[in-house]
Image: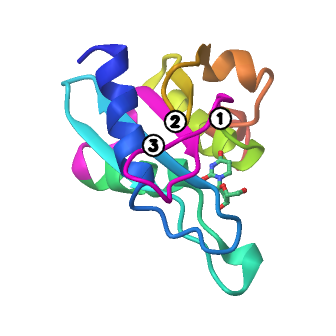
Amino acid sequence: MTEQELIARARGAALKAYAPYSGFSVGCAIESVDGEIVTGANLENACYRLGLCAEQSALTTAQHAFGLDKVKRIAVAGGDGSGDALAGAAPVTPCGGCRQAILEAAHLAGRDIVILAASGDGEAVERLTIEAILPHGFGPKNLEDGA
Ligand code: THU
């Protein structure tokens, strides 16, 4: 799958977001090492702090579909999802909590994970890796010295 196709899947997923409080729809598409794709979107709640991010939604589906250790590439896009297509000019990079969740997959897989951070309209794309945006992160390997 090309970068643009994976971003298109993330943009499409954002249209299924439930984001009535922020008005900011985020979609995420995850590709496995075998080319499988799963998607997710943010899911907000009247109790604001219980909202779920698109990345964590998609990572949960990835675990069920093929396992976190097979996550290869992730596309994220966010913006105004009220129209026929997601809109917005600024690339959306994963929040701190989502970076931690992506790092878990990277540590399980034993390799870095590519993140395509796209704008709502898909025109602007930042090519990142989890090691680059969460350097010196704490993950499952750090627990190896425990009892
Ligand atoms: N959001 C995500 O889904 N992923 C991120 O990485 C950043 C933020 C969502 C959470 C909330 O529903 C909305 O965007 C505004 O913060």
How many angstroms separate mark 1 from mark 2 (CA)? 7 Å
Q: Quadrant of the N terminus?
A: top left
The answer to whether residue 17 is above or below residue 123 is: below
Identify the mark at residue 76; answer none if there is no mark: 2
How many angstroms separate mark 3 from mark 1 (CA)? 10 Å
Whether label 3 lies within 8 Å of ligand 1 gets the answer yes
Left or right of 119 in this view: 38: left
Q: Secondary structure at mark 3?
A: strand
Image coordinates of residue 80 in percent, x first then y, are 58, 51
Whether label 2 lies within 8 Å of ligand 1 gets the answer yes
Left or right of 7 in this view: 91: right
Q: Which one is in front, 102 or 104? A: 102
Taking the view exactly as shown, the residue that stands out farthest to the right is 136
Instruction: Report the amino acid beneath label 1.
Output: Val
The answer to whether residue 117 is above or below residue 147 is: above
The answer to whether the residue labelled 3 contacts the one labelled 2, judged by CB atoms less than 8 Å apart, is yes
Which residue is tagged 3? 28
Residue at image x 24%, y 43%? 66
Identify the mark at residue 92; answer none if there is no mark: 1
Q: Which sits earlier in the primary sequence, circle 3 or circle 1?
A: 3
